[in-house]
């Protein structure tokens, strides 16, 4: 089974957790694109969606779904999103698609957070995938220096500007044995908007698609 097949299988399995008539939070990325396609193909009736990126908003609208602002709805029943890595405690690295800040906001506002991914995303220790950090542009060098002091090797993701108008630093070389503490420490650096560690608020459920079928954590 290739990765796309695993992603699609996980997306299809997540339909079980979409409550008809409720607000659905929708993340960003290739696995989420499969989710949107599955929602449309199965005619799932939701009250509307809160989107984590402009790209997801465009895809949702093209599929016929109403997109709402979080300020209009206040709370979200379920949020479904992908991940770049997950450990066995459902701590995640996210942000490969540069939508980490809006993703984290929607996750915090949701009663239930379901992560969907192919089985290759499951790791014992987070950090093989470079950790994205969204930063205010003028603080990029300062934040980079602070991240180096923490043992990381930050690389500016050039030619990428987030939907919020900020820059992304991808931090290589970190072995994240304590994701909650690492998330808190990076968030305290002045100039950091969000770090792509979803540990203080982890996923409630991770659905992995693979050659042996669906695995739930």
Image (cartoon, rainbow, N blue to C red):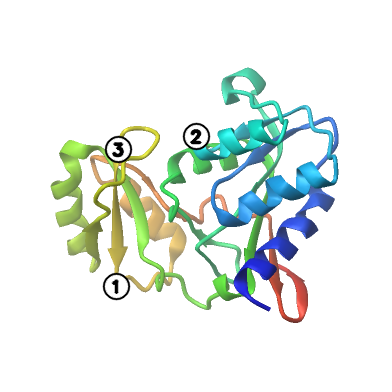
Residue bearing mark 1: 173
Q: Residues within 10 Å of mark 3 (few under 14, many from 20)?
A: some
Residue bearing mark 2: 54
Query: Most extreme residue toward the front, as rendered?
Result: 62
Q: Taking 159 as reference, is 62 left or right?
A: right
Q: Is residue 89 visible?
A: yes
Q: Taking 163 as reference, is 124 left or right?
A: right
Position in image of residue 153 (x %, y %): 22, 66
First in sequence: mark 1 vs mark 3: 3
Residue at (36, 65) in percent of width and height? 130
Residue 178 location, quadrant: bottom left
Q: CA distance from mark 2 to mark 3?
A: 15 Å
> Is 151 located above or below residue 166 in the figure?
below
First in sequence: mark 2 vs mark 3: 2
User: Marks 2 and 1: in contact by CB < 8 Å?
Assistant: no
Position in image of residue 73 (x %, y %): 66, 22
């Amino acid at each position: 089974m290739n990765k796309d097949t695993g992603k699609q299988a996980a997306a299809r399995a997540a339909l079980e957790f979409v409550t008809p008539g409720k607000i659905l939070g929708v993340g960003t990325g290739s696995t989420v694109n499969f989710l949107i396609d599955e929602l449309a193909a199965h005619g799932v009736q939701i009250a509307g969606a809160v989107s984590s990126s402009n790209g997801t908003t465009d895809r949702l609208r093209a599929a016929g779904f109403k997109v709402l602002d979080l300020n209009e709805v206040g709370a979200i029943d379920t949020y479904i999103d992908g991940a770049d890595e997950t450990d066995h405690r459902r701590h995640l690295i996210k942000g490969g698609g540069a939508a980490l800040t809006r993703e984290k906001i929607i996750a915090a506002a949701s009663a239930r957070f379901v992560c969907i991914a192919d089985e290759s995303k499951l790791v014992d220790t987070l950090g093989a995938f470079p950790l994205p950090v969204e930063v205010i542009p003028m603080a990029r060098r300062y934040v980079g220096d602070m991240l180096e002091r923490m043992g990381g090797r930050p690389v500016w993701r050039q030619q990428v500007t987030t939907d919020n108008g900020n820059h992304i630093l991808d931090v290589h070389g970190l072995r994240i044995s304590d994701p909650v503490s690492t998330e808190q420490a990076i968030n305290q650096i002045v100039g950091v908007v969000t770090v792509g560690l979803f540990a203080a608020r982890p996923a409630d459920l991770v659905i992995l698609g693979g050659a042996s079928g669906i695995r739930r954590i």
